[in-house]
Image (cartoon, grey):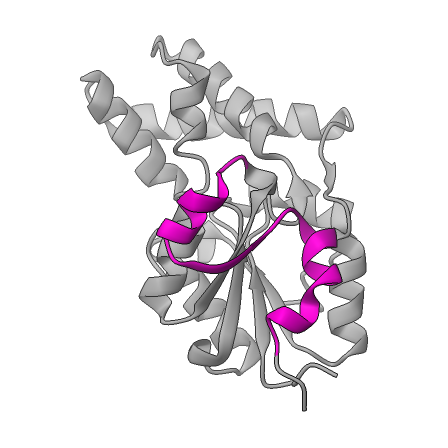
């Protein structure tokens, strides 16, 4: 049985829930509404990092003036667009996500969720997974000073579990997750379900890469020790 001193710290979008492209389209709608023209692929390459950092980078790259009012509008419009898609049923757990979390729970292996999203958008995803934030540590962008690629989210999640971050596994689908894992001095495990390639995830620090939560569960003994 995997050791109980190994904690799993999960990203949410693209790692446990199939929602990356819904976020891409929601940001596209928000940016279009603000009059910022960007190709969808450019937006996708930034998904997974802090929403504030994301919009700052995109606005700086386009040469458009960055103001707090503009950033606030973009965040609001993105949340509205994403939640509309979520309520229409297009956001669902990835294959094996619920089973992986159930396995860890049954094996008494601690786990938590750390997401760059705010609770305004994360709530739908947690509900889809059947995760109750009152029973499972869930750290959102609202609760930390900096989000990915800074390590704050995962460090806070480890603290909530009462475990050492150095013995934790960060499970994510983007290079931003893997960079945050490195900065937290945790081991990064990458999933292909967010649209990043295996080499990209490995170059960013992933020591193992799997297709999705179902594939990770199938190979669980490769990433945790046996007692």
Q: Residue at the spot x=51%, y=74% of the render?
A: 168
Asked which quadrant contains residue 22, the reply is top right
x and y, in percent, of residue 104 in the image: 73, 71
x and y, in percent, of residue 171 in the image: 55, 59
* Magenta stretch encompasses residue 178: no
Which is nearer the eye, 204 or 183?
A: 204
Q: Is 169 on the left or on the right of 127, as rendered?
A: left
Is residue 20 among what the camera can see?
yes
Q: Residue at the spot x=66%, y=48% of the render?
A: 212
Up/down of 181 relative to 124, above or below: below
Up/down of 103 relative to 128, above or below: below
Query: In which quadrant will I find the N terminus?
Result: bottom right
Is residue 148 among what the camera can see?
no
Which is nearer the eye, 184 or 60?
A: 184
Q: Is 72 on the left or on the right of 193, as rendered?
A: left
Outermost bottom residue: 227
Q: Residue at the spot x=76%, y=24% of the render?
A: 88
Query: In which quadrant will I find the C terminus?
Result: bottom right
Q: Residue at the spot x=38%, y=22% of the render?
A: 42
Up/down of 108 relative to 194, above or below: below
Up/down of 95 relative to 195, above or below: below
Asked which quadrant contains residue 37, the reply is top left
Q: Is 70 on the left or on the right of 80, as rendered?
A: left
Which is nearer the eye, 153 or 180?
A: 180
Q: Which residues are magenta?
A: 195-224
Badge count: 0
x and y, in percent, of residue 115 in the image: 52, 51
């Amino acid at each position: 049985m995997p050791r109980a001193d190994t904690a799993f710290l999960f990203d949410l979008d693209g790692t446990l829930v199939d929602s990356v492209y819904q976020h891409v389209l929601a940001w596209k709608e928000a940016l279009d509404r603000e009059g910022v023209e960007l190709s969808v692929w450019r937006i996708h390459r930034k998904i997974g990092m802090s929403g504030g950092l994301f919009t700052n980078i995109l606005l700086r790259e386009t040469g458009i003036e960055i103001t707090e009012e503009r950033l606030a509008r973009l965040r609001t419009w993105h949340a509205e667009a994403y939640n509309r898609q979520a309520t229409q049923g297009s956001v669902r757990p990835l294959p094996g996500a619920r089973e992986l979390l159930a396995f860890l729970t049954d094996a008494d292996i601690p786990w938590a969720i750390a997401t760059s999203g705010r609770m305004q958008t994360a709530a739908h995803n947690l509900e889809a997974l059947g995760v109750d934030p009152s029973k499972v540590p869930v750290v959102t962008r609202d609760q930390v000073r900096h989000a990915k690629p800074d390590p704050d989210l995962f460090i806070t999640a480890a603290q909530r579990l009462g475990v050492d971050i150095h013995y934790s596994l960060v499970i994510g689908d983007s290079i931003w997750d893997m960079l945050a894992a490195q900065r937290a001095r945790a081991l990064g495990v990458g999933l292909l379900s967010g649209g990043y390639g295996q080499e990209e995830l490995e170059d960013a620090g992933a020591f193992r890469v799997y297709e999705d939560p179902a594939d990770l569960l199938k190979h669980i003994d490769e990433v945790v020790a046996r007692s």
